[in-house]
Image (spheres, rainbow, N blue to C red):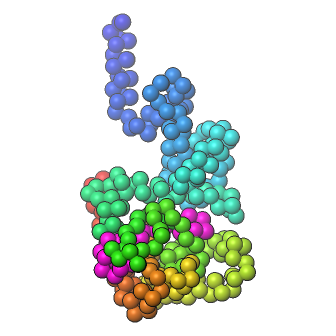
């Protein structure tokens, strides 16, 4: 090989090594190298590029057609990727809007990558203390369409207080303290579409349920937490507080529940005040981390 060709090859190698993994992935996709590199998983790379389209968009909701245009893939391929990412929780689809937004699972990955702690490490000690101190089921939850999903769970040491809820379990969004805490922290612009879907699901009891949702929203505004009695299960009382992370991330809720006779109004108030303090502590810590990361960059 001539010296000039060696220099050109060396320069290309240095340029490739210096570029970011994201840039290299995009270069592979655009040049068709995907099919030539046996160690490169094409579907995975394309899925990540779909998520990047949301991260770079500067807007919350994006249509499937816009995603396809932004990443330069055929619309049928993009549609399959969007469906897979929605099914696994990385995207959320609004049938009313016919658009997608980032889902809860994306934030979980982000916290797993952040030092010096992960989301679980932040929340789990508080859940354990709540469960052991007040003999309740304590959980970190998030909304998935019209349900509430349990993401982190700690049970009371007293088996009589333990609810049959584990990680991945679902309870209704409407009519529960946990669901109302999540709704209370949602942007106002998203509520009409959500309420329309909830009314369709709970058409027979919507008047009563919508009133309880408004009560929950008011309680969160006035005292930071909300309660519910005999909600998703006729013998279960609950108390919950929204947990809002910086940067417009998906909303979480911290919640406690127990059989009604073991969680009367006075105890709900005591736990609610503790939940408000915990949420404030976590949100403050996260804002500090965000500030430190911004200063470091």
User: With respect to residue 239, does 16 lie above or below?
Assistant: above
Residue drawn at the location 49% of the way across and 52% of the way down: 55
Answer left or right for 281 relative to 210.
left
Outermost residue, top side: 1
Q: Quadrant of the N terminus?
A: top left
Answer left or right for 272 relative to 203.
left
Nearest to the observer: residue 93 or residue 161: 161
User: With respect to residue 189, does 54 lie above or below?
Assistant: above
Residue drawn at the location 49% of the way across and 61% of the way down: 168
Regarding residue 281, the answer to whether it shows in the image is no
| Residue 256 x %, y % | 42, 78
Q: Residue 204's image quarter?
A: bottom right
Answer left or right for 86 relative to 18.
right
Outermost residue, bottom side: 266
Q: Residue 62's image quarter?
A: bottom right
| Residue 172 x %, y % | 58, 72
Residue drawn at the location 59% of the way across and 77% of the way down: 174
User: With respect to residue 270, does 102 lie above or below?
Assistant: above
Residue drawn at the location 28% of the way across and 55% of the way down: 115
Answer left or right for 161 relative to 27.
left
Q: Is residue 146 magenta?
A: yes
| Residue 177 x %, y % | 51, 80
Regarding residue 232, the answer to whether it shows in the image is yes
| Residue 72 x %, y % | 60, 39
Nearest to the observer: residue 246 or residue 202: 202
Q: Which residues are magenta?
A: 126-148
Q: Is residue 49 magenta?
A: no
């Amino acid at each position: 090989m001539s010296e000039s060709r060696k220099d050109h090859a060396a320069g290309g190698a240095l340029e490739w090594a210096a570029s970011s993994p994201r840039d290299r992935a995009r270069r592979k996709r655009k040049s068709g190298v995907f099919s030539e590199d046996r160690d490169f998983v094409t579907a995975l790379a394309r899925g990540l590029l779909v998520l990047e389209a949301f991260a770079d968009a500067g807007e919350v909701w994006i249509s499937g057609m816009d995603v396809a245009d932004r990443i330069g893939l055929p619309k049928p391929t993009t549609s399959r990727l969007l469906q897979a990412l929605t099914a696994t929780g990385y995207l959320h689809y609004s049938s009313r809007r016919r658009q997608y937004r980032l889902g809860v699972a994306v934030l979980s990955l982000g916290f797993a990558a952040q030092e010096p702690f992960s989301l679980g490490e932040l929340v789990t000690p508080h859940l354990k203390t709540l469960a052991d101190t007040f003999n309740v089921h304590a959980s970190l939850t998030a909304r998935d369409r019209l349900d509430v999903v349990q993401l982190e769970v700690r049970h009371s040491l007293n088996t009589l207080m333990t609810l049959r809820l584990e990680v991945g379990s679902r309870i209704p969004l409407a009519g529960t303290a946990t669901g109302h805490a999540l709704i209370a922290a949602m942007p106002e612009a998203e509520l009409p579409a959500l309420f329309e879907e909830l009314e369709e699901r709970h058409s027979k009891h919507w008047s009563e349920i919508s009133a309880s949702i408004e009560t929950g929203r008011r309680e969160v505004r006035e005292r930071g937490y909300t309660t519910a009695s005999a909600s998703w299960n006729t013998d279960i009382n609950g108390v919950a507080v929204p947990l809002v992370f910086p940067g417009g991330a998906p909303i979480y809720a911290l919640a406690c529940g127990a059989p009604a006779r073991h969680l009367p109004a006075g105890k709900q108030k005591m736990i609610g005040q503790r939940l408000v303090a915990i949420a404030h502590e976590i949100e403050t810590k996260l804002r500090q981390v965000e500030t430190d990361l911004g200063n470091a960059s």
